[in-house]
Amino acid sequence: MRLDIETRDRLLSIGFPILLLALWELIVRVGWLDARFFPAPSTVLVALSNMIAKGELLGKLWLLPEVIGKGDGEGAQKILGEGHLWASLFRIFAGFFLGAIPGIVLGVIMGMNRTVRVALDPVISAVYVLPKIAILPLVMLIFGIGETSKIVVVAISSFFLVLINTTVGVRDIEPIFFEAAKNYGAGRWQLFWHVIIPGALPVIFAGLRLSLGTALIVIIAAEFIAATYGLGYLIWFSWQTLLIEKMFAGLVVIMILGALFTGGLQFVEHKLMPWQREERPATIDAAEPQATGPGWPPIVN
Amino acid sequence: MTVKIRATNVSKFFSSRGGAVTALREFHLEAQEGEFVCIVGPSGCGKSTFLRILGGLIPASSGQVTLVPNKPETPLQSIVFQEYAIFPWKTVLDNVAFGLEMRGMPRAQRCEIAGDWVRKVGLTKFADAYPHQLSGGMKQRVSIARAFANDPEILLMDEPLGALDAQTRAVLQEELIRLWEASRKTVVYITHSIEEAVLLGDRVILMTAHPGTFKCEFAVPFPRPRAFELTGTPEFSRLTYAIWKELQSEVKRALEQQQ
């Protein structure tokens, strides 16, 4: 049987990881690998489902209907907040939006305004190189040891990444597009919506992608040291108490999260920037339907 | 005949590391309403600079430029850029409708007008395509349609066909003649091709080598409507050769300057 190249590639990209997992399972079962430190994939999967069943990962979801029935919003929040996954996700997205939106706004201003750019550039370059997790103690001094600090650290890391990308994206727009827009009567806001935002969007999105990835790193690290819920806490606590299969389960959840983030952003990018889609350019025949030399068909007037 | 464009003693200086550079020296031009004026000159003579001054993209350093408006409801001038300058993030239809959209025309109305111009340049099948899916010739068609759809009193064209291959160029020259002959707008057309200038224009103005200024001008007596067949006639060859004889020395001078 002959497979076409796409089917073959797909089978290979799904099949090979499954093969690796099967190999791992086998090696552990035979006893070549210490199951205490490297539990078999099946063990990790069981641990994962146990954690979901006990409400560790997603919270005690079965209590939700009753609480919502009573109209107890705070109670619902508490239930979800005790799920490690939701705790981390909330911090990531709250921080991400809190950082990315001001980052885009200031980035556009810096891209357009030389004075602001020259004044802020050295400060931003200096702060940017700091690993954001390094300022967690400082942030905790200011905002305390609660939720706020963790969200703020994520927000700061997102802010700088998005800010720098937006500035570059705006500055890289070809000047001819500004000239054309102005010549065709665009005002300030029209320039913003019709040239600056779409022109910089691909680079802004590169920044968003980076900062979502960084947010994941930062929040896990922050939860290692300063949290009682969250995937980072789950991994750290499982390690300390030698519940290694739970530690692995945490890693699996983070991997799935990372993949979902990438896929989700790709989807949004696709929707927002249809002009970026890879499509085959029109062929010569289709491109020049009227290019048949002298005596080509008349223009319809 | 009424004067539509009057430029007198227009100069442009740019400051650079080595001091001020004169890009344009005391150039003058007058165009009547409905006239197709071509400006030909060697590379680097400042002809594009002059067009950018006419289009209001850069100010003149000295001299007067007057474009005479007489239809307040439509734009005075629109530029067709050499590099097309159509927006990669807009579809063909939205690119053509751009000027109308900037004027606040409702979507249905502007799409109707733009759709009409998309049809006139033969791109109906590509109305919803994005520029990266188009060939160079198609992109320039979009750029030309955008200018015509905007319905300005004056069209300023900066070597619009300069980047195209010879065959596509010939097709678009004929297309341009037909579009223009149907509308008779005042046109200032920059090109470095004498043949193109004689085929399209009512008048051909020659510029000197850098720093460019007015050298001389030729009236183009051929009747309209014109077609590409004109380029095969002895009269056409005689005129283009006469212009070339004038331009030759300037082109040589421009080449020497580059060395």
Image (cartoon, grey):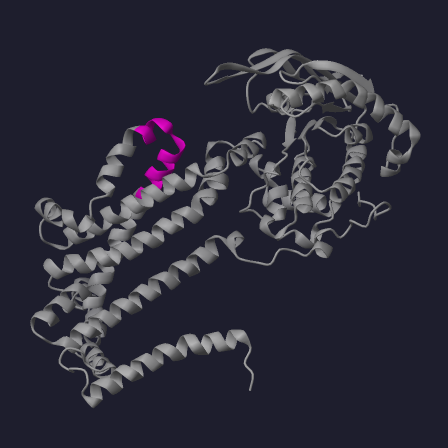
**Residue A144 x %, y %:** 9, 49
Residue B205 visible from this viewpoint: no
The C terminus of chain B lies in which quarter of the figure?
A: top right
Left or right: where B63 falls relative to A126: right
Q: Nearer the viewer, residue B72 or A254?
A: A254
The magenta stretch is A103-118
Query: Which image quadrant for residue A93?
Result: bottom left
**Residue A125 to residue B43: above or below:** below
Residue A238 position by quadrant? bottom left
Q: Residue furthest front?
A: B259
Q: Does the magenta-highlighted stretch encompass residue A13?
A: no
Q: Residue at x 34, y 62 (%)?
A: A261
Residue at horizontal 37 percent and vertical 42 percent from the top? A166
x and y percentages locating residue A185 in the rendered image: 56, 31
* B90 shown above or below A222: above
Residue A99 visible in rendering: yes
Q: Is residue B159 placed above or below A72 in the rendered structure?
A: above
The quadrant in which the N terminus of chain B is found is: top right
The x, y position of residue B86, in whole percent, is 59, 41
* Main secondary structure type of the part rendered in magenta: helix
Instruction: Name the residue at 29% across, 66% down.
Output: A257
